[in-house]
Structures are given as C-alpha cells and as structure tokens.
Image (cartoon, helix red, strand yellow):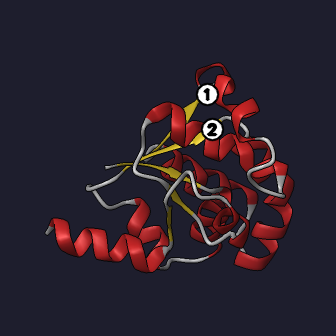
Amino acid sequence: MKIVIDSNRLIAALLKDSTTREIIFNKNFEFIAPSYIFSEIDKYKNYIMQKANIEEKNFDVLLSLIFEKVKIINELEYNKFVMELEGEIKDTKDIPYLALSLASKSIGIWTHDPHFKEQHKIKVYTNIDMLKLIKRKN
C-alpha cells in the first residue's frame, strides 16, 4: 500500500525505537514523501539528537536506514496539485504532503498532525489506523 509519510512520523521514528519505527519497516507499505521533508528533518536535527541522546554519526545512520524505506518524490511530480489545495488546510507547510497524496494516488497520509483533519480530500491515518491495516493484511 502506497502512503505518504508526514515528517512528524519520521521524527518520531528517529527519537526512539517505537511502534512508529516498526510501521516504517513493515513490508506492507510503500512510503513516499515530498522532497520538502529534508528541510523539516534538518530543521529539527539538533533537537532530535539531543532528545534521543544520539551522536550525529548515529543519527545519520538511522536516517539513512529510514530513508531506504521512504521514497522521496520531487516537487515537479506533485506541484500541479498545490494550487488546488490552497485554502484546504491552515498550515501551508502541509500542502506538499496533500499534493503528493493526490498526485501519487496513495491511500492517504500517515500523520499525527491535527491540521490534516481540517481537510476532507485525503484520508488521514494514525499509528492505530496503520496497525489495523497491518493486521488486516496479515
């Protein structure tokens, strides 16, 4: 199942070994993210390393492992949907995720960001929803 992963799920996976990390490495999903995700991760890199108590080398290794499971999609592939989505959601930084979901025909977005619940074009999945999908698939 193809699904867009929001940066908050990626950050959660970087912070600790958790359900989020398990879901990322589950074989049932094909995760995709807009190229914009790199700037969001970079913005919180120091916070993540401090909170997770890991050195930069370990952070980089973990990030590389996670990005082996997340395909990054160039803005050109979803940009035509951005204008259509303006006004759908207050946090404009979330628009690339919505646009990518529409462009890729994914099943939705995996996030814990409450802003995504403002819109009604894309299905929003939480960890609980993802675990239900895994259970149904197995």
Task: Find numbered disc 2 in the image and state the secondary structure of the residue it sits on.
Answer: helix
| Residue bearing mark 1 | 78
Q: Which of 15 and 37 is in front in this view?
A: 37
Image coordinates for residue 10, horizontal then vertical, percent: 60, 60
51 w.r.t. 107: above or below: below
Image coordinates for residue 132, horizontal then vertical, percent: 30, 76
Which image quadrant for residue 74? top right
Image coordinates for residue 32, horizontal then vertical, percent: 50, 42
Image coordinates for residue 134, horizontal then vertical, percent: 26, 69
Label 1 with label 2: CB-CB less than 8 Å: yes
Residue at the (47%, 53%) spot, across then down: 108
Residue type (three-letter) at the residue carrying disc 2: Ala
Q: Nearer the viewer, residue 105 or 58?
A: 105
Residue at the (67%, 34%) spot, across then down: 35
Residue at the (49%, 59%) spot, across then down: 123
Label 1: few (<14), some (14–19) or many (≥20) C-alpha neighbours in 10 Å: some
Label 2: few (<14), some (14–19) or many (≥20) C-alpha neighbours in 10 Å: many
Instruction: Give the number of callouts.
Output: 2
| Residue bearing mark 2 | 99
